[in-house]
Amino acid sequence: MNIEGLDYNTQREKLILPEYGREIQNMVDHAIEIEDKAERQRCAETIIGIMERMFPQNKESNDHQQKLWDHLALMSRFQLDIDWPCDVQQAAQIANKPEPMPYPMTPIPVRHYGNLIFEMFEKLKTMEPGPERDELARMTANQMKRNLAQWSHGSADDEKVVSDIARFTDGKIQLDLDTFKFDKVEIKDNERKRKKK
């Protein structure tokens, strides 16, 4: 839909530093076009003053002025020809985005338990029977029940947890529901309200 006279942000050029808004960006663009260097300098200093008033809480930091001038340099795409009161060459590093972190994409047979629980299953398979393995099995089973309750909106079946832990540990961990007691699972308030309706 194109209506003459309406100017949508989605149709405008992307802001370099959105926290300052489009008006500050327009001021910076205007300052670049000023031909008189003295006037351009005054304009840049005025823009810095406005930027400083926008975030007064930042005045306490030691490098506050440096950051403001760095931001001005970035917003001007380093095209603003003025006498910079500080070195703004490092400002280019602010604009560099870090490389995205790789996300481990290991397949999980039952997603609601999560990768950590499956790591516990592998650990339980290799442990010798004893109090340490029993404690890890207890902690794993209780976490499985919490995960199951979270994914199924408050209901968690003890038999399912016992069956799953036996299946995923290749039968090494066999919990007896007559003797094994799960911790009480707390249901969040919004889930309680939803169950009451």
Image (spheres, rainbow, N blue to C red):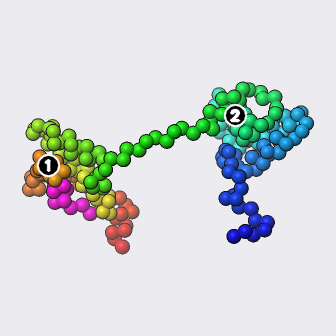
Distance Cα–Cα, label 2 vs label 1: 59 Å
| Depth check, front residue: 107 or 5 | 107
Query: Residue 50: which numbered mark, if any?
Result: none
Amino acid type indicated by mark 2: Asp
Does any portion of residue 148 appear in the rendered image?
yes
Does any portion of residue 187 appear in the rendered image?
no
Q: Which residue is mark 2?
A: 70
Indicate the position of residue 47 as horizontal and vertical percent values.
78, 40
Q: Residue at x 89, y 33 (%)?
A: 38
The picture quadrant where one finds residue 98 is top right
The picture quadrant where one finds residue 197 is bottom left
Task: Give left or right: position of 44 versus 166.
Answer: right
Q: Which residue is mark 1?
A: 170
Most extreme residue toward the right, as rendered? 36
Q: Are marks 2 and 1 in contact (CB under 8 Å)?
A: no
Q: Residue at x 77, y 37 (%)?
A: 79
Task: Give left or right: position of 47 versus 192.
Answer: right
Region in magenta: 154-164
158 in magenta: yes
Tag 2's secondary structure? helix
The picture quadrant where one finds residue 112 is bottom left
Q: Is residue 172 above or below residue 153?
A: above
Indicate the position of residue 129 as horizontal and vertical percent values.
9, 39
